[in-house]
Image: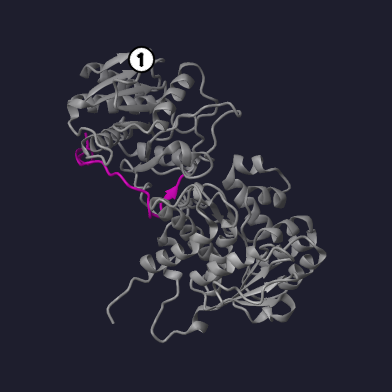
Amino acid sequence: MTEADLTPPTLIDPRDRALPLLTLAELRSAETGAAASLPEHTLMSRAGRAAASFLHEQITRPSARGGSTDRSKHKVWLIAGPGNNGGDALVLATELHRAGIAVELCMPVEVKPDDARWALDAARAAGVAMSTTPPASFDAYTWLVDGMFGIGLTRPLEGVFADVARRLTQRAKARPRVGGVLALDVPSGLDSDTGTIVGEHDAVAVHATHTLSFIAAKPGLFTAQGRDVAGAVTVAPIGTDTGSESSESSGSGRSTVQLNAPDLFARFLPPRDFSTNKGSFGSLAVVGGDTGMCGAPILASRAALYTGAGKVHVALLGEGAPPYDPPHPELMLHAVDDLPLDTMDALAIGCGMGHRERATQVLHDVLRLDVPKLFDADALNLISKDPALAAEVNARGVRGDPCVLTPHPLEAARLLGTDAPGVQRDRLAAARALAARFAAVIVLKGTGTVIAAPDGRVAINPTGNAALATGGTGDVLGGIIGALLAQHLPRYEAALAGVYLHGLAADTLTAQGQGPAGLTAGELAPMVRTLLNRLFYPATDA
């Protein structure tokens, strides 16, 4: 045992941390490099010890929902798969048993790799209770541990493993008052790169209440179905250092995905000095609003006001719009032809824009302007149908003036010439493909929004919840990012900040009981203002 193995394991809460999210290939490379410099079995030993430390902390921590912190009141059931994930579970069981916590381990198929065989021998020598079949009921256990399969699973769960996955999921969804379901590394059945469940539509994966991710966090834990099945994620670097670094690239030279956090964008926010004025924070024009559709640009424009833009204009394409916005007379409403768009600091284009020829012409006109631009909603659909518009968007990016595109999965599918399920099967690949095709910064909306830049930088956003699944929230996001562009944030950082604040507003309102059901898009903007000031412009004594 090395000196490092005598120190308490490091456990990292990924919230508000710009952690690297390593793919399967990057993880394999990290494992190989670490294992080559360490005594045999070290990584598995550290993984099991980290899991034991995590569970011990959970068992002895007072819960807001009640329950005993007396270790003797807890009983842990573990299932070990045939590979190294099963070995991790065996080490965990041995550590808990030695700590005086009652454990039972189920191993339907005996483990095969050398490391896992070593762990099995140690568990047997320690006297860990083992069986080959799961119990008829889990009622006697407070914690259930999924150690069936880790990263790299290529086929759907079957047989006893699929059955256990369903039963663990039932326990997790019941939200037990005491204990929970812990997945080791990744929930079994989840693709750690994409966040999708391995297999066809009827395939299963463990839904955990907690996931302890070894070496580093994985992209699939934070996007697509991964956010639902992983539960609360904690990272255990187990001495490889990759779990806590905020690096831009991996050893392969390929850009590493990062978890979006204020560390990535806070320094780009403008200072709010006493000597500043409205001109210091830019002018934004929200362009859209065909006849009968002015609500969307108004929502976006209100959000821009709350995000700190100095002046916000609404450039409307249609007829019959109100002369001003009564709740927010600060907004300046114009017919699109009456506003000199080339004098703006940024443009947000597409909300309620419609699909008429007039809208297409406006897009051609604004693409000629040397002003930072965001395209959303109808603008994206027009670009997907018009090769000339698509070529103009790409040309701007190639010249060093990338646009920001904010598609939801269906809009992304239209832009890529595929379908929404294809986009959702690999959201990272879809966002990267869009960034390359349009030489643009891409905000692929959805659970675990993916932000991708044409230079290869990619981030997954951890904030947001089902409260955003209502009409108008995308318009609000466009206004937030547009306001940040007007305040002269670089395109990628404006997208990171906007997506983060938008999601955090939904999380905060939900925590206050105003979501996830029934939260309206218009309620997000005031909370964005609160968070922006609380996090980045705290009040100081004069």
Please indicate whether residue 150 sits to the left or right of residue 177 in the image: right
Query: Which residue extends farthest right?
Result: 357
Q: How many marks?
A: 1
Please indicate whether residue 410 sits to the left or right of residue 174 in the image: right
Q: Residue at x 53, y 65 (%)?
A: 480
Q: Residue 110 location in percent, x, y?
A: 39, 15
Q: Amino acid at mark 1?
A: Pro
Residue 152 among magenta residues: no
Q: Main secondary structure of the magenta part?
A: loop
Please indicate whether residue 384 sits to the left or right of residue 64 in the image: right
Query: Which portion, as a residue range, is magenta?
Result: 1-22
Q: Residue at x 20, y 40 (%)?
A: 3
Q: Secondary structure at mark 1?
A: loop
Does residue 39 appear in this view?
no
Q: Is residue 486 above or below residue 120?
A: below
Q: Residue at x 58, y 65 (%)?
A: 299
Q: Residue 338 location in percent, x, y?
A: 72, 81
Query: Which residue extends farthest front?
Result: 326
Which part of the image, by quadrant, shows the C terminus? Answer: bottom left
Which part of the image, by quadrant, shows the N terminus? Answer: top left
Say which of 410 and 213 sits in front.
410
Q: Residue 160 location in percent, x, y?
A: 46, 16
Instruction: Say which residue label 1 marks.
Output: 135
Does residue 133 appear in this view?
yes
Q: Residue at x 54, y 40 (%)?
A: 194
Say which of 424 and 36 sits in front.
424
Q: Residue 47 location in percent, x, y?
A: 32, 34
